[in-house]
Image (cartoon, rainbow, N blue to C red):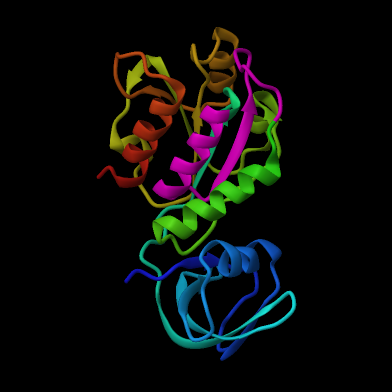
Amino acid sequence: MRLHRFYISEKVGSKTELILDNTDVVHQIRKVFRLKKGDLLIVFDGSGSDYTCGIEDFRDETIVLGVRETSKSRFMPERDVHLYAALVKKDTFEWIVEKATELGVTKIIPILAERTEKKAVNEERLKKIVIEASEQSGRGSVPEIEPVISLKEAIIALQTKSIAFHTDAELFETSDIRGNEPLACFIGPEGGWSTDEIGLFHDAKIPVRSIGTQVLRAETAVVATLSLVMFGK
């Protein structure tokens, strides 16, 4: 039977006993999954390892775990990819964050663009989404969620190799991102980047590429683009 898997912020390392005090995790174990003393579960701390643990005791607001076995997490991103995603409506953006986590991005930065439909996000909600997606996908790390920032501010602050995606541009080739250094990917909102925004990319010498002539919804573009970036050879 597949064991339930939980993210904890405490680094496990060589510890043989853990005290879970995160109220959300404790609630899930006790009330949602109704695990009992002696049951097994898996915890991970973002280091790339999974720790199989047995429940040793339930206390008032904590759970005592005994670490039984350490193994490598099912999936760890091979490349440090930062997703700069233009904001879209709430449910769609949350879906984008979930799928980007499953695909392996290491950082997600919501971008204010000229054609964005929303101007803010619930950061705490998004952090819960990336934790849940990491737990369920077998990923050994949890991506960072950064505050909302304008496209211009994001470009000014860039410190990594970057590429922007837009329908009306040269076709993307894997040679555009050859190498394994950190990479920033800019993906626009419904309707794409504006002419002025494309100008910002050109001024910053950020290549603008297309993944095809078809017009994709924002969420489809994110999944298709990240799949090429993360897994394309």
Q: At which x and y percent is residue 59? A: 70, 82
Q: Residue lying farthest top? A: 195
Q: Residue lying farthest right? A: 60
Kindly identify the residue that appears in the image at 39 percent across and 15 percent down.
Answer: 167
Q: At which x and y percent is residue 186? A: 51, 30
Range of magenta residues: 91-120
Q: Nearer the viewer, residue 162 or 135?
A: 135
Seen in the picture, residue 54 relative to 214 is either above or below; the reply is below
Kindly identify the residue that appears in the image at 62 percent across and 33 percent down.
Answer: 110
Say whether residue 212 is left or right of residue 90: left
Q: Nearer the viewer, residue 219 or 1?
A: 1
Q: Residue lying farthest left? A: 233
Kindly identify the residue that appears in the image at 52 percent across and 40 percent down.
Answer: 97
Q: Is residue 116 magenta?
A: yes
Q: At which x and y percent is residue 188? A: 51, 22
Q: Nearer the viewer, residue 62 or 18?
A: 62
Q: Nearer the viewer, residue 140 or 62?
A: 62
Q: At which x and y percent is residue 165? A: 43, 24
Seen in the picture, residue 57 relative to 24 is either above or below; the reply is below
Kindly identify the residue that appears in the image at 60 percent across and 13 percent down.
Answer: 115
Q: Is the C terminus in the top left, top right, bottom left or bottom right quadrant?
A: top left
Q: How many marks?
A: 0
Q: Residue lying farthest bottom? A: 16
Q: Is residue 229 magenta?
A: no
Seen in the picture, residue 77 relative to 163 is either above or below; the reply is below
